């Protein structure tokens, strides 16, 4: 049975309609795959890998324009220097735990060169958040086969959320976090486009947590639902991937990525010091050949029309974070630590308490 | 009689205590002065200049560390290249209208060299937002004497808000905007520090406007209070100046400036394409000599302790924007255009309607 | 009689052919105008304004893509925040002295709105270098009529170099500096394009000065030609404007601008602390409408083909700096200070001394 | 017998004295270790790993301030987001080949957590350049034991140069490249400090190659020494690590890193499109505790005094590149390809031919 999502709880946020799946996969061609690693023996595993293919065509030969933004840089995301320089996304994107970015990266190199031998070098994009509270991170559970599994699992349509893939061991706003996604169908003067967000959410203070403006975190104190932490809260992070089919230049993608902060701020994110808040936005609206031989044309949306996309990004990111919390389930992990799911009934009660009279 | 402020309306936001004046001037040494230019003849003037002195000592000889951040770059702010390079704030800061940045800048040069002749060159920091809807901007009303007046008016303590100084002709969330300020006394593991924000608020869509999470903008439709615009909304902007007495390095100031976005997002700001959303943060916690002759020591706050400052910045910025709206008064300007003040009673009613049961 | 240029002295550098005028104006449509202000009474003036029109069509309605790079940020250049955000160049560019950026900026606002009234706001791009050693800078000599004069003087073809316009009071590598220009016709796999550079050169240590690798500065010690300084050298700066007709996106323009450093380094520039080394590159290869109503196509050069442009930029910048020195003439200025021209015969002798056997 | 270095050939460049070893290790505490992987069976290996320890004390507990700069971003360097955010260098630095950044990173994670268990997360800094022309890169030769070997080999004093460690398979200016190093003892008004550079040099066009201004590359055409390439030249890259004991803040380190471009430009580098030109500068002049509990003081050099450091960086980087070429030896690699060493006699002859009369 499918996990519920925010809207299944009767809670709606924003004014822009969602795509069919309310997921990053509403952008045609985008595919997401997870490999979830859960084990109690010999060492506790609550981790995994999530892979995103940005377009239907092989990304190695059909590049996307992309842009990158950092809210707070206490995190890693390989491959971003070439995004900053050229705005070319040339590989799949993966998200995993902090200590195993390397094996995921090198496995993507190997996979890419084996699949597409003509390409002599590859610099994959791999991001991370830290799951060492629930996962015995220094057991280094992620192996090459997990990366391949995530690749093979990649598909369009419904995206599994919560404690899956790279999101398996996440904690967000002091509740169990993980993978979340959402999308918006944006009617702009340039036509209708889709923007989709996927988050690996591992950040935030409970007392700041809000849903559509309602201070839900304050409404669910630790006296009701215990904290995930039994010592000073550890730094968290959030990785956000944005996709759109709007025709954008690299700089326009970067501007989209910067608006992730707006959506996160609505949920209570401040971008704390220990957080790696790293955002990548890509557009499938242009299909950039890997080896062009002459000047070629690309399409761009008029700058003023981007306002509608900006609004859509803010809404999609806000809802994706909440979706990650709604889908996640209470998890016992490393050293018996327990991270409680955001209780759906208390969420609904809080929303009702603050609903307009 | 003093204008009311948000808290005078019984509306409180945030959990961190304010400074004595709930103003940027709560940071010891910071002074603010306005020159307000209002005239109907021969051409309509609704404009002005606001000047901020960053510390008690002459800033030309006692530099502050500072950092700069851009949410959306459709605006101008002179002198930022040296901030980005060195993190040294070496001049007062001024804010005015878009078309007269130059005269304010050059007047500050003249003033600086006359007052402090030993300094052979000066690169003042002057920011702007556009007031051409209410102000006949191409009449170029601002003259050197206005800049001098703002300088001479500068004082600590209470800061006049609303339709004053550079904020005279502003429109914010489709209501009359202007200058606003707020502060927070932040208890960190490193001790208690003050953060203060001053905004010249000229941005935003009414439908997105929120106060402490409540969708106030949607609660006050244009059927109740007419729009300030009788044609497609013009781009706005917001300039934010942050001050703190916490001992910060330049990079730490930059991080503070980036958190302005968090506070703005809480009020409904998305950073639209036509907006110049430019933020400067400075620290008085170090007093940098203008001509050091040997290595010297400066103090820095531990990075993790900045989280408390970040939270304080978000709150202060959020409240400063609302304060600008609460203080502003309905204004008729250029071509008879009218920008209505945010009605206090409707604001209060909206807050009540969404208060918890 | 025209001033000689480097090549007139029999000195050639680089391997790429020049354009017809070996000037930024070799990029079709680019026009340059100077207003030179020289007076001894009542106060010494050695200053001026240089204006560059980026394309034949009115720039206000036919934007160029552009990019900005800073080697060292001790200088000012208004209007760059919008370049960084959007890559749109929407106004003429002006260069003047440090203390009068403002009057030049506001005059360009006035001129723009008067000429093109439909445009309601303008944020002109004005850069500066410091001429206070030879010019009584606090006499504020530049007046609006000088800006208008520079505008009206703007033309294609030969660009006057040396002690003209904004370059009137410059000192470069301890010799008399000023305005210089050069260009390259670059044969790339994408076709032939022109890159042109214009510099206002006011930077550098004589001992580091090189011409085509030859340490000319060391060959012309102050025992032969006295220093321009009778006290510790003051900070200098260099502003560089690059133009090309190659079809480039904003990010590609930024990359071009970054290569200015390469050309400068060849002449001995290190980017010292007191220097404002600010570079703007624009492309006329796309004509961006000011008010597009739907997505539109723009052309871009394949990234690998940019290598040829990069090489051309390095050569053009290198030669433009030397041209500024060759054209400048010995100048007596403020307080009787004297900056000697780079002596052509000693330059030639140095080049001969280091020529291959 | 030690390999010769540039100065052993009687060629001296620059005017600033070198440190004792003319190496990055002249900065007290800096240690460098290599693991060189050379094999012909079963698959051709010409690769390796180089590790740099930034200070004597464990870097995990005694952080350095650091700064990062990109000339051209077609390369990868993990861990830089935290440098950009905080300026804190918290791990050793490693350099390897493009396709194995991951295994080196994860091995450093494992080593760090095993050695320093109290640290719960680690984000190592690993850079790369591409050696797939001489090395069968998709054989993935680098294994964890190589990383450990490089760590264990790390020492102060003489640094082995040329075809060692990460530099084993490099090609630079179309000659055999590799690891190079150099240093300068800089007398500043703030006192004497050391700056040291280490490069993994894999970049550049032969025709642009210069030594102390002399066009050595043009003097050694492919008719004399065949090209390393039998097809269109592949993109190269250069990684540069700068160390200094001058007391610098993070932003000052970033400025130092930016001056790497100056030194590279002197050797003929333009920063071509396919190049990953990534530079990290760190200072041992402050010892930043990993867990400070209160504000603390750090030392900074006056900004104007950095000019001397800038000059030293330019010289050290220039000489380090040439040292990498002088030490490298002719190498036959993957598919029988051959990269010739820069012939010492032809280098000397070129220098003589251009020496002053």
Image (spheres, coloured by chain):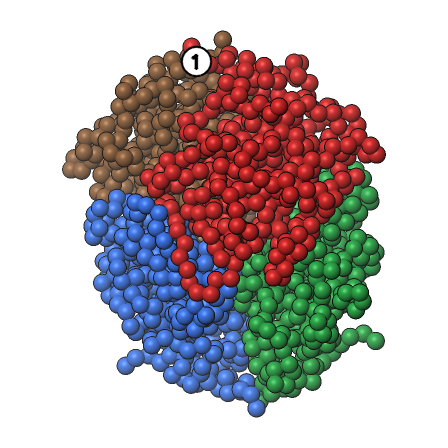
Chain colours: A green, B blue, C brown, D red
Picture layout, residue D203 above or below residue A16: above
Picture layout, residue C326 above or below residue A320: above
Whole-percent x and y of residue C161? 37, 27
User: As drawn, which residue projects farthest toward the bottom?
Assistant: B357
User: As drawn, which residue projects farthest toward the top?
Assistant: C357
Q: From where the camera sits, is residue B172 visible?
A: no
What residue do we see at 77% from left, 29% from top?
D334
Q: Is residue C156 left or right of residue A95?
A: left
What residue do we see at 29% from left, 65% from top?
B29
Helix, strand or loop for disc 1: loop
Picture layout, residue B206 above or below residue B356: above
Closer to the camera in the image, A93 or B209: A93
User: As drawn, which residue projects farthest toward the left?
Assistant: C42
Q: Is residue A68 left or right of residue B216?
A: right
Closer to the camera in the image, A269 or B175: A269
Q: Quadrant of residue B278?
A: bottom left
Q: Quadrant of residue D335?
A: top right
Mark 1 highlights which residue?
A: D356
Picture layout, residue C224 above or below residue C238: above
What residue do we see at 42% from left, 63% from top?
D295
Q: Is residue C24 left or right of residue C232?
A: right
Q: From where the camera sits, is residue D106 visible?
A: yes
């Amino acid at each position: 049975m499918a996990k519920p999502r925010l809207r299944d709880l009767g809670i709606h946020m924003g004014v822009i309609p969602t795509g069919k799946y309310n997921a990053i996969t509403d952008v045609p061609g985008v595919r997401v795959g997870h490999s979830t690693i859960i084990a109690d023996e010999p060492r506790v595993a609550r981790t995994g890998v999530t892979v995103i293919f940005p377009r239907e065509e092989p990304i190695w030969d059909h590049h996307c324009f992309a842009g990158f933004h950092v809210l707070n840089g206490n995190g890693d995301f390989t491959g971003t220097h070439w995004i900053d320089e050229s705005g070319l996304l040339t590989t799949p994107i993966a998200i995993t735990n902090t200590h195993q970015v390397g094996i995921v990266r090198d496995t993507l190199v190997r996979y890419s060169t084996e699949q597409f031998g003509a390409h002599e070098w590859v610099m994959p994009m791999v991001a991370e958040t830290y799951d060492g509270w629930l996962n015995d991170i220094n057991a280094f559970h992620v192996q090459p086969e997990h990366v391949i599994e995530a690749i093979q699992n990649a598909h369009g349509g419904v995206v599994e959320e919560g404690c899956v893939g790279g999101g398996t061991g996440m904690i967000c706003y002091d509740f169990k976090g993980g993978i979340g996604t959402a999308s918006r169908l944006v009617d702009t003067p340039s036509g209708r486009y889709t923007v989709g967000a996927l988050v690996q959410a591992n950040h935030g203070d409970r007392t700041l947590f809000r849903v559509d403006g309602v201070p839900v975190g304050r409404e669910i104190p630790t006296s009701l639902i215990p904290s995930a932490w039994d010592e000073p809260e550890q730094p968290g992070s959030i990785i956000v991937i944005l996709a759109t089919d709007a025709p954008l230049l690299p700089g326009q993608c970067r501007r989209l990525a910067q608006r992730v902060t707006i959506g996160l701020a609505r949920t209570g994110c401040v971008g704390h010091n220990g957080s790696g808040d790293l955002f990548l936005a890509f557009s499938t609206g242009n299909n950039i050949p890997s080896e062009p031989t002459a000047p070629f044309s690309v399409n761009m949306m008029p700058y003023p029309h981007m306002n509608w996309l900006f609004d859509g990004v803010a809404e999609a990111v806000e809802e994706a974070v909440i979706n990650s919390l709604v889908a996640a389930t209470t998890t016992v992990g490393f050293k018996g630590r327990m991270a409680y799911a955001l209780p759906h009934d208390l969420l609904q009660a809080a929303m009702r308490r603050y609903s307009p009279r």
